Image: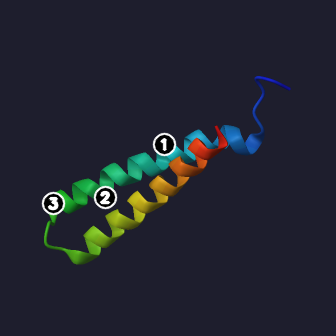
Amino acid sequence: MPGEQSTEQAAAPTETDALKHKLAESLMGVIGAPDDQDVACAADDVLRDLDARLARQAGAA
């Protein structure tokens, strides 16, 4: 019905918010250890995950 969301769609914003929070934490880690390649790679992975999720949401809209 119009205005109703499936369980999967309703859970998506929560997962997106969790990724946003994880990205913020990862970026603070990069600021704290700017020369640490592993920290930078971990932040990059989170950013790519968030980007993919937002692209899927935009495509579904």
Mark closest to the chain's N terminus, 3 or 1: 1
* Residue 11, position as x, y percentages in the image: 65, 42
Q: Judging from the image, what secondary structure is the residue with disc 3 in? A: helix
Question: Circle 1 — which element?
Answer: helix
- Residue placed under numbered mark 3 in the picture: 32
Q: Which amino acid does label 3 sit on?
A: Gly
Q: Provide the residue designation for mark 1.
A: 17
* In the displayed structure image, the side of residue 36 where residue 6 appears, left or right: right
Q: Distance between the residues labelled 3 and 2?
A: 10 Å
Q: Do the residues labelled 3 and 2 touch (CB within 8 Å)?
A: no
Q: Which of marks 3 and 2 is nearer the N terminus?
A: 2
Please rate how many residues cluster around mark 2, counting C-alpha atoms within 10 Å: few if below 14, some from 14 to 19, many from 20. many
Q: Nearer the viewer, residue 29 or 37?
A: 37
Residue 26 bears which disc, if any?
2
In the rendering, at what x and y percent does residue 55 appear? 53, 50
Could you tell me residue 13's position as x and y percent?
Answer: 57, 40
Q: Residue at the spot x=48%, y=60% of the render?
A: 49
Judge by depth and name the residue closer to the eye, 5 or 26: 5
Residue appearing at x 54%, y 52% in the figure: 53
Contact between labelled residues 2 and 1, with CB atoms less than 8 Å apart: no
Amino acid type at mark 1: Asp
What is the spatial separation of the Cα atoms under label 1 and label 2, in whole angstroms? 14 Å
User: Which quadrant would the N terminus be assigned to in this image?
Assistant: top right
Q: At label 2, which amino acid type do we have? A: Ser
Q: What residue is rendered at 15% in x and 66% in y?
A: 33
